[in-house]
Image (cartoon, rainbow, N blue to C red):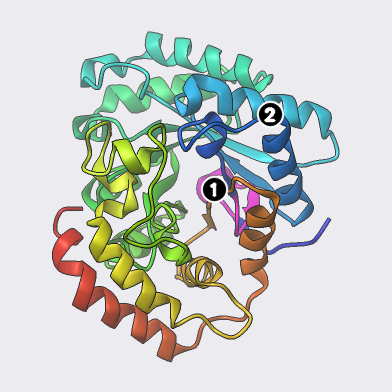
Amino acid sequence: MILMEQRTLGRTGRDVSVVGQGTWQLGGDWGEVQESDAFDVLDAAVDSGVTFFDTADVYGDGRSEQLIGRYLKNRPDADIFVATKMGRRADQLPENYVLDNFRTWNDRSRANLGVDTLDLVQLHCPPTAVYSSDAVYDALDTLVDEQRIAAYAVSVETCAEALTAIARPGVASVQIILNPFRLKPLDEVLPAAAAAGVGIIARVPLASGLLSGKYTKDTVFGPDDHRTYNRHGEAFDQGETFSGIDYTTGIEAAAEFAGLAPEGATPAQTALRWIIQQPGVTSVIPGARSVEQARANAAAAALPPLPQSTLDAVRELYDRSIRAEVHDRW
């Protein structure tokens, strides 16, 4: 196995790789994935130094969790920290975020993953009011006391939600959209998290593939791909698809971003490297649907830090082409 830089994931006290493995796509929400192909992707990630998997009970309605559970049973040599999420399988009402439901959701995830205690459970972008509820955090503390979970965290849509969660002493980490097309978390969220000892997990790091530089205005995604059916937020928050950016705008900006890639690095690796070196980031969790993608993502951890001139160019591109469209919304 290749060694990769490890960072402590906030209040969990556990170290995880700076490049993790997102597994939304393994559930089938980006198109069908065979189990053998999923295992090959996970093998490639682990053998490239990845020690952190991120999943959710809603990814493929539990299929992603089940695949990870079966995979880890077959790879006892792999020391993997698994973060899952809960809450999105229920109607998105604050009154559904109660202890009885948490136990039910938790039982299902533990069965899917084949463990007695989950490493980390994140509230999966719940209604905004949930982040301010004392009863919610009391219920999460109960899950820890019952040894159902080792730690809990949140996944958020907005910076305001992140700041509310960071103020809670039991929140171990915050998962938030962060990439060269979504810079707002740099202003307040990352500094607040660092000051509080809260980890930051950066999701949607490639803006649903835009930052890979592989797509054009004429690219057609399958009907079962969220980049088709959720482009305007029809199924869930628009920010989860292309970071909420209009596709045409994103394609044009991505072509310009590709020109910032240093010699020997792809645009996707450049985006991941940019995220890794932001102060306060613990891990970035790109997805992968092929062995080659998983290896290339992990290799971004070994790239030299981007120079200040590149960081300045990313900021200028964002301010000129992206900021007016997404900054205030999220």
Q: Secondary structure at mark 2?
A: helix
* Residue 159, visible in the rendered structure: yes
Q: Find residue 120 and report its image quarter.
A: top right
Q: Identify the residue shown where x is 61% and y is 60%.
A: 297
Q: Which residues fall within the magenta stretch? A: 8-20
Q: Identify the residue shown where x is 21% and y is 43%.
A: 232
Q: Is residue 12 left or right of residue 58?
A: right
Q: CA distance from mark 1 to mark 2?
A: 16 Å
Q: Position of residue 307 (x, y in %)?
A: 49, 88
Q: In the image shown, does 14 or 209 lie closer to the viewer?
A: 209
Q: Find residue 98 and report its image quarter.
A: top left
Amino acid type at image mark 2: Glu
The circle on residue 243 is none
Q: Position of residue 111 (x, y in %)?
A: 62, 14
Q: Which residue is mark 2?
A: 35
Q: Which residue is mark 1?
A: 287
Q: Is residue 160 left or right of residue 295?
A: left
Q: Identify the residue shown where x is 53% and y is 30%.
A: 27
* Residue 168, visible in the rendered structure: no
Q: Quadrant of the N terminus?
A: bottom right
Q: Tell which tag, 1 or 2, sits nearer the viewer.
A: 2
On whether residue 206 falls in the magenta region, the answer is no
Q: Secondary structure at mark 1?
A: loop
Q: In the image shown, does 12 or 244 lie closer to the viewer?
A: 244
Q: In the image shown, does 305 or 128 lie closer to the viewer?
A: 305
178, above or below 112, in the image = below
308, above or below 294, in the image = below
Q: Identify the residue shown where x is 62% and y is 36%.
A: 82
Q: Is residue 128 left or right of residue 276?
A: left
